[in-house]
Image (cartoon, rainbow, N blue to C red):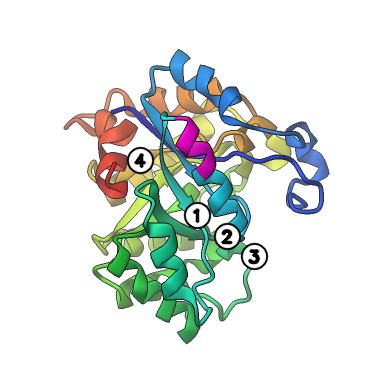
Amino acid sequence: MKIDSHQHFWSYNPHRESWITDDMSGIRRDFFPKDLEPLLRQNKFDGCIAVQANDTEAESQFLLDLAAHNDFIKGVVGWVDLTAESCEERLSFFSQNSLFKGIRYTLQKEKPDFILNPLFKRGISLLSKFNLTFDLLVLEHQLPEVIQLVKEFPAQPFVLDHMAKPQVSKGLSYDWIENIKLLSSYKNVYCKVSGFLTETEDFKWLKNNFNPFFDVVSEAFGENRLMYGSDWPVCLAAGSYADTLEIVEDYFYTQENGLFKKLMGINAEKFYHL
């Protein structure tokens, strides 16, 4: 299958979606499956993974309800409070739905000591019991803590969202390169080639701005642990669905060893058990 491994839906609420800043005002509206399906069909995708945008169980249920009525949504990455005493019970509840594939936290907004907090790590330890993945939404300065986390859970499948959001307009940083290399040495970690358009200053970019970052992650993670994600509709703040796809296609299509087909679906199928 050809899979867009990272996109979102929401019924816009200015309080709940307060993370959509003024410079992203164009996405301050509803986004539903009927808006995405034509784009997937036009670009010959078989389906997508719907990923949470808010840390609530209501969001998880919202996405599962959408998936139940739209068969192109092949899986849902939702949210459960991994620090709660009821964590195991809630994971069990959501895992009864075969479309519930994994958990994501907006770790980028958490306090510095959260990622390695014992309560959070206890929650991470329970995911494998339910065959659930974990999406890592972090900023590049959080990579050392992420590396320590994945080191402690070698059997837990993790995927790094948006390449840890490097600041594209500032160019490559030594710390980001070295931490990406170290993180990729843990074979239970994948990486999404996603979310790069909006990591540019004033959302101004040229196609080749992203190539140095693609060079690093493709060398680090190799052909079997990269997956493509549009980050739609967030990407619309800085470009179009077609822009995101074209940038990735232009860079990766000529890669050898079957990387392109794996990037565009095979690896997502394997990771999310589609």
Mark 1 vs mark 3, CA separation in Å: 17 Å
Please give the residue where the numbered disc 1 appears in the rendered image: 78
**96 or 33, which is in the foreground?**
96
Q: Where is mark 3, residue-wise?
A: 109
Q: Amino acid at mark 1?
A: Gly
Give the magenta range. 65-70
Residue 273 at x, y percent in the picture: 27, 46
The disc at residue 227 is 4
Please give the name of the residue rendered at 60% of the width and 39% of the height, measured from the top-left corner.
9
Specify whether residue 154 is painted magenta: no
Quick one: label 4 or label 3, which is nearer the N terminus?
A: 3
Q: Is residue 116 above or below residue 206?
A: below
Residue that label 2 marks: 57
| Dot 2 and dot 4 residues touching (CB under 8 Å) | no
Name the amino acid type tagged 2.
Glu
| Of callouts 1 and 2, the N-terminal one | 2
The answer to whether any part of residue 156 appears in the image is yes
